[in-house]
Structure formats: C-alpha cells, structure tokens
C-alpha cells in the first residue's frame, strides 16, 4: 500500500520540476512579458513559488531541506531573468524593437580626397619634374607689365582683348593697371627677371578670365606654364617634350596635332590639340585644344636683358581643366567648381 504522505511528496517534487522548467523556458521578449512573469512566479498571494513553499509540509522530513533549497534556487533564477530582461529593455527605451545586433561592422568614417584638379596639377608637375624642370610660382594679382607689356602685348593691340581681364585697379597715371592674371605666362617674366639662362621651370597656378561661362569655359581655371631657355633650343625640342608628355598623360596611342597659332610672346606659335574619341559624334570624336606654345619671341628675351643671339627657348601653357576633362571623361567644366560630393567622391 502506498503511503498517502509519500504520494503527495512525489506530487510536490513533480510540481517543482515543472516549475523549474517553466521558469527557464518562458520567453521574456517585452516589458509586458516580464511583468507577467514576475506576477506569475513571485506574487505573494498567487505566485507559483509561494504556492510551492506552502507545500513543504507535504514533503518527507529528510527531503525538506533539499526541497527548500531547490525552491530558493528557482526563485533566484526568476529574479535573475527579470533583472537581465529589464536591463535590456531599459537600454533601448525608445526602441522597443529588436535587440541591437552587436556583430554588425562599425560605421567607417568618410575619408576626403584630393580634388581632381589638384590631382591633375600634381601629376603634370611630377611628369615635368622628371624631365628636369623646377617648380616656380607667382602672384595671382598682377600688374599690366608682367601680364601683358613684358610679354610683348603692344598697348592697344587687339591681342589684349583675347584675354578678357578682371581689373582690380583700372589703368591710371600712377600705373598701367592691377589685375587678376589672365594666364601663368607673367611668371615667365618674373623668372627671367631673377635668373640667368639656362632656365627650365614649370609654373602651376590659378588664372582668371571674364569670359562667358559655358560647358568649356569658366571665370577661373588652372594652367601649367613651362619655360626652357638655353643655347640651341629649337622647336623640335618643344615638339618632342610635348609629345612625350601627351603619351604619359593619355597613353602611347594618343592622337595629337600642332596647329599654327598666334601669341604676342612666342614666334612661331602653335596650339596643341588632342583627339577626344566619342562614338556619339559624327566623326567619331573631336579635336580638343589643351595648350598654347611656341618659341619665346626675341623681343621678350631682349626686354629682360637676355641675349637673343645666344639664347633661344620655348614656352607652353596648358589648361588643366581641359586636360582633366579629357582624362576623366568630364563633359562640363562647371561641375569641377560645384563641390558636389557625389562627383568628388569618384576621385578618391
Ligand atoms: N598664355 C597662353 C594662354 O593662356 C598660353 C601660352 C603659354 C602660349 C606659353 C604660348 C606660350 O593662352
């Protein structure tokens, strides 16, 4: 015959087992669920732990201690689970949504990059440095003498109109005009004023022109000037170096041409065009002008006290925006000055 006391002790143990299982497995996925959980197990009046404590008398004396310990452990587990769930939910108070995924990679800080014009300027300068040219610089605010007169522009010659000038001070009886330089050529003069031949310099810089703004012209742009003065320098030297430069910039198969032109400070003068391939155009592309160049006019040399019987030289001046447009396939010069990060990011 089974002892009724024994029987209810077994039932109490079974209830404890069942309770432990529920304590462990209950899903605590919201603040409401945690509240329910607390009431269900810990409430003084109807809590299941309290209910179980009340059954201790049913358990045989030798098992009472163990039974009590198990209940205490179960209670501790309930409290621990409530605490950890509460911490989790109060951490994300405003978002009761999903728990953050701690394995996600961090946000990478955005890195800046050099403007495509700066990149092109540096690249061109580096190429000419490798040919033995030194870097020279001059002021962006110039006087008429360096920007025009010393470069053999006669006072009322229409050539001055080629360069739509921004004047800072109009010509007066004190001086012949202060202006924003319209090209980097005045730095040729400044170098020759300060140095005797042989001279071999490259001049990167910003220039300004009061021009109608369009897809290929802007009111400011950048040039790289080159000047080489020595004994026996010829047009062949000029063509050779420009060709070498174009191959470095645009590849071995670059198509280029020298087209006769006019500048007051070079004689003979030429402009250099690069063939810009474009399948959408009727001819499959078009010639794009990238620089002016020529043999330094003897008048310029003599004006600076350089013996033009002994020394000859070449000069060139290239437009950096044009070259960047060719190199990077940019269709409109204005985008280079809009500082649109979506554009600039493409050059990082
Ligand atoms: N300074 C000229 C221009 O801006 C370019 C040039 C430079 C031409 C040197 C010849 C020699 O158009």
Image: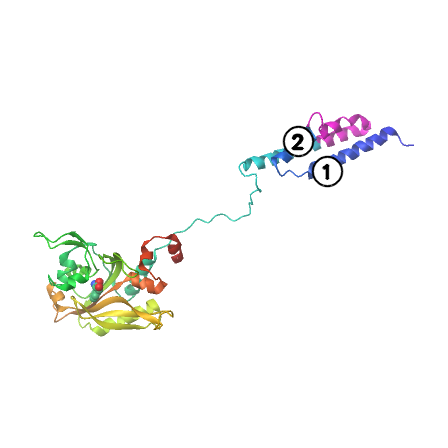
Q: Dividing the picture into quarters, in which one does residue 64 lie?
A: top right
Q: Is residue 341 visible?
A: yes
Q: Tell me residue 179's x, y (percent).
A: 17, 54
- Furthest residue to the bottom? 236
Is residue 63 inside the magenta stretch? yes
Q: Is residue 152 visible?
A: no
In the rendered structure, which segment of residues is drawn in magenta? 43-72
Whether residue 5 sits left or right of residue 190 in the image: it is: right
Q: How many marks?
A: 2
Q: Dividing the picture into quarters, in which one does residue 146 lie?
A: bottom left
Q: Tell me residue 335's x, y (percent).
A: 33, 56
SS assignment at label 2: helix
Q: Nearer the viewer, mark 2 or mark 1?
A: 2
Residue at numbered disc 2: 38
Is residue 86 inside the magenta stretch? no
Magenta stretch: dominant secondary structure: helix
Mark 2 vs mark 1: which is more N-terminal? 1
SS assignment at label 1: helix
The vertical placement of 273 against 333, above or below, is: below
Whether residue 17 sits left or right of residue 314 in the image: it is: right
Q: Is mark 2 within 8 Å of ligand 1?
A: no
Q: Which mark is residue 21?
A: 1
Question: Is mark 2 in CB contact (under 8 Å) with mark 1?
Answer: no
Q: Tell me residue 185's x, y (percent).
A: 20, 61
**Which quarter of the rendered picture does the C terminus lie within?**
bottom left
Q: Which mark is residue 179?
A: none
The vertical placement of 144 against 257, above or below, is: above
Which residue is at 38% across, 58% downward? Answer: 347
- Furthest residue to the front? 282
């Amino acid at each position: 015959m089974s002892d009724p006391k024994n029987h209810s002790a077994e039932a109490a143990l079974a209830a404890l087992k069942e309770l432990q299982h529920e304590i462990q497995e209950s899903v605590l996925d919201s603040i409401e669920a945690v509240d329910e959980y607390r009431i269900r197990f810990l409430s003084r009046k109807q809590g299941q732990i309290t209910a179980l404590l009340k059954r201790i008398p049913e358990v045989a004396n030798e098992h009472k201690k163990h039974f009590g310990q198990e209940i205490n452990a179960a209670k501790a587990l309930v409290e621990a689970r409530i605490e950890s769930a509460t911490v989790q939910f109060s951490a994300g108070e405003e978002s009761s949504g999903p728990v953050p995924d701690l394995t996600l990679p961090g946000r990478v800080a955005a890195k800046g990059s050099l403007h495509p014009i700066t990149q092109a300027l540096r690249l061109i300068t580096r190429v000419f440095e490798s040919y033995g040219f030194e870097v020279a610089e001059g002021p962006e605010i110039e006087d008429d003498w360096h920007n025009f007169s010393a470069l053999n522009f006669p006072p009322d010659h229409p050539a001055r109109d080629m360069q739509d000038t921004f004047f800072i001070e109009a010509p007066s009886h004190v001086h012949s005009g202060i202006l924003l330089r319209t090209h980097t050529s005045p730095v040729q003069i400044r170098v020759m004023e300060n140095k005797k031949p042989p001279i071999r310099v490259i001049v990167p810089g910003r220039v300004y022109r009061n021009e109608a703004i369009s897809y290929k012209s802007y009111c400011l742009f950048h040039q790289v000037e080159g000047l080489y003065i020595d004994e026996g320098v010829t047009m062949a030297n000029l063509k050779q170096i420009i060709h070498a430069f174009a191959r470095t910039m645009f590849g071995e198969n670059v198509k280029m041409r020298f087209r006769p032109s006019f500048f007051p400070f070079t004689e003979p003068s030429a402009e250099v065009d690069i063939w810009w391939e474009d399948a959408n155009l009727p001819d499959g592309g078009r010639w794009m002008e990238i620089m002016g160049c020529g043999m330094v006019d003897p008048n310029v040399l003599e004006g600076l006290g350089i013996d033009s019987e002994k020394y000859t030289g070449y000069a060139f001046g290239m437009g950096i925006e044009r070259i960047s447009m060719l190199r990077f396939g940019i269709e409109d010069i204005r985008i280079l000055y809009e500082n649109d990060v979506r554009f600039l990011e493409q050059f990082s």
